[in-house]
Amino acid sequence: MAKYRLPIDKSQAASSMGVNLGPDTSARQNGSVGGYMVKKTFESLGMR
């Protein structure tokens, strides 16, 4: 179980970026979703 709740869900981030998560998607696309989640997390904390 996660200790903290992120401001954005992985599937929500992927759909907003137009990426279909899964084994058929490139590692670069799947990784960009993680980077986007980190970006949104810091933006929500006010750390740009």
Image (tube, helix red, strand yellow):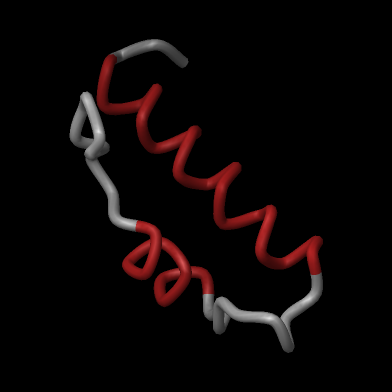
In the image: residue 32, left or right of residue 7: right
Across the whole image, how many numbered discs are drawn on residues? 0
The quadrant where residue 29 appears: bottom right
Coordinates of residue 12 in the picture (x, y in percent): 32, 67
Residue drawn at point x = 72 percent, y = 81 percent: 25
Q: Quadrant of the N terminus?
A: top left
Coordinates of residue 10 in the picture (x, y in percent): 39, 59
Q: Nearer the viewer, residue 23 or 34?
A: 23
Residue drawn at point x = 21 percent, y = 26 percent: 4
Q: Nearer the viewer, residue 24 or 29?
A: 24
Q: Residue furthest front?
A: 1
Q: Residue furthest bottom?
A: 24
Residue drawn at point x = 51 percent, y = 70 percent: 17
Coordinates of residue 15 in the picture (x, y in percent): 42, 76
Residue drawn at point x = 73 percent, y = 88 percent: 24
Q: Residue furthest top?
A: 47
Coordinates of residue 19 in the picture (x, y in percent): 57, 78
38 versus 31 height, above or below: above
47 versus 24 height, above or below: above
The quadrant where residue 32 appears: bottom right
